[in-house]
Image (spheres, rainbow, N blue to C red):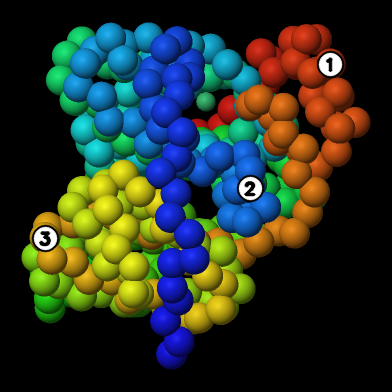
């Protein structure tokens, strides 16, 4: 086994999206090729309601999947097909925008901490226009295990030490783990060589290979090894995310991610023609 090393540390960009929700864009557009098939990672951790209360009112998506993972707080989502769901601490919403939908994501609280992540996972060219769907995954439906060393691993997608995650995807084989390490713990995870991978620390400070990745930092891993080794000197929580690159052209215009400019133009035409409002969105 050859352990991967951190090739670059990224702090992300402070920004606001939706109706004034303050967040950190950790995976920005300039990293889309480097971290293909992942297009974006937003991290939000706000305890001032002014920084989250506006939420994300109605907006469209096409051509990829959004994965929302809540740590604290509650968010209600609704879509153009009339579906509705409440996302709470430890829960995941996995939404396949596919050919397009309109949805909103709004806080279901007026005070307290709102913390979580939204990851965008690309779809391969031949699946960008599939029928939209979503899955609300309750906290107790996310497989998890604890190692002998006391490390808790929540397997949102992919496989970890024989535990199959809540979601699998054959095209990009995404791995999405939430790992909680007690002081002094060690953990290793197999990663196929060539899959793009990164960690994001959201509590404490992790030792990743020979590099320290502190709170609210992303460590992009090199592509060469087949495992990643984690340890820590204080209680630490981090996301470990990896996937098989699609190696296809990426054309993004805001909430639309296609392969060509022509497809983006078509998307804007379809959106203006009201086709997204008429979308049938399946609950899986
Ligand atoms: Fe959205």
Percent x, y for residue 251?
A: 77, 38
Tell me the residue that label 3 is attached to. 234
Say if mark 2 contacts mark 1, CB within 8 Å. no
Circle 2 or circle 1, nearest the eye: 2
Observer-nearest of 251 and 269: 251
User: In the figure, 159 relative to 53: above or below?
Assistant: below
Question: Which residue shows up at 69% across the image and 18% down it?
Answer: 276
Marks 2 and 1 sit apart, C-alpha to C-alpha, by 25 Å
* 1 with respect to 149 (left or right): right
Q: Which is more N-terminal, label 3 or label 2?
A: 2
Residue for point 35% across, 74% down: 209
| Nearer-N-terminus badge (3/1) | 3
As drawn, 248 above or below 115: below
Kindly report which numbered mark, 3 or 1, lies closer to the viewer in this rendering: 3
Q: How crowded is the residue under tag 2: few (<14 C-alpha within 10 Å), some, or many (20+)?
A: some
Circle 1 residue: 269
């Amino acid at each position: 086994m050859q352990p991967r090393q951190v090739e670059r540390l990224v702090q992300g960009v402070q920004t606001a999206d939706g109706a004034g929700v303050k967040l950190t864009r950790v995976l920005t557009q300039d990293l889309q090729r480097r971290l293909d098939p992942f297009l974006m990672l937003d991290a939000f951790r706000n305890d001032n309601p002014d920084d989250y209360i506006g939420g994300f009112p109605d907006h469209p998506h096409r051509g990829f999947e959004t994965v929302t993972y809540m740590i604290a707080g509650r968010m209600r989502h609704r879509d153009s097909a009339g579906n509705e769901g409440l996302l709470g601490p430890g829960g995941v919403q996995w939404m396949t925008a596919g050919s397009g939908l309109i949805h909103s994501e709004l806080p279901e609280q007026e005070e307290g901490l709102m913390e979580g992540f939204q990851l965008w996972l690309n779809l391969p060219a031949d699946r960008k226009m599939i029928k939209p769907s979503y899955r609300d995954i309750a906290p107790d439906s996310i497989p998890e295990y604890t190692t002998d060393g006391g490390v808790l691993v929540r397997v949102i997608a992919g496989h970890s030490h024989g535990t199959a995650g809540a979601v699998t995807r054959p095209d990009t084989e995404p791995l999405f783990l939430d790992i909680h390490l007690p002081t002094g713990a060690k953990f290793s995870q197999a990663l196929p060589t060539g899959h793009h991978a990164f960690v994001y620390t959201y509590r404490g400070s992790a030792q990743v290979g020979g590099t320290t990745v502190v709170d609210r930092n992303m460590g992009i891993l090199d592509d060469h090894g087949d495992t990643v080794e984690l340890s820590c000197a204080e209680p630490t929580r981090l996301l470990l995310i990896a996937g098989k690159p699609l190696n296809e052209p990426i054309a993004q215009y805001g909430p639309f991610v296609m392969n060509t400019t022509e497809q983006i133009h078509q998307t804007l035409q379809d959106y203006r023609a009201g086709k997204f409002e008429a979308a049938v969105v399946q609950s899986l």
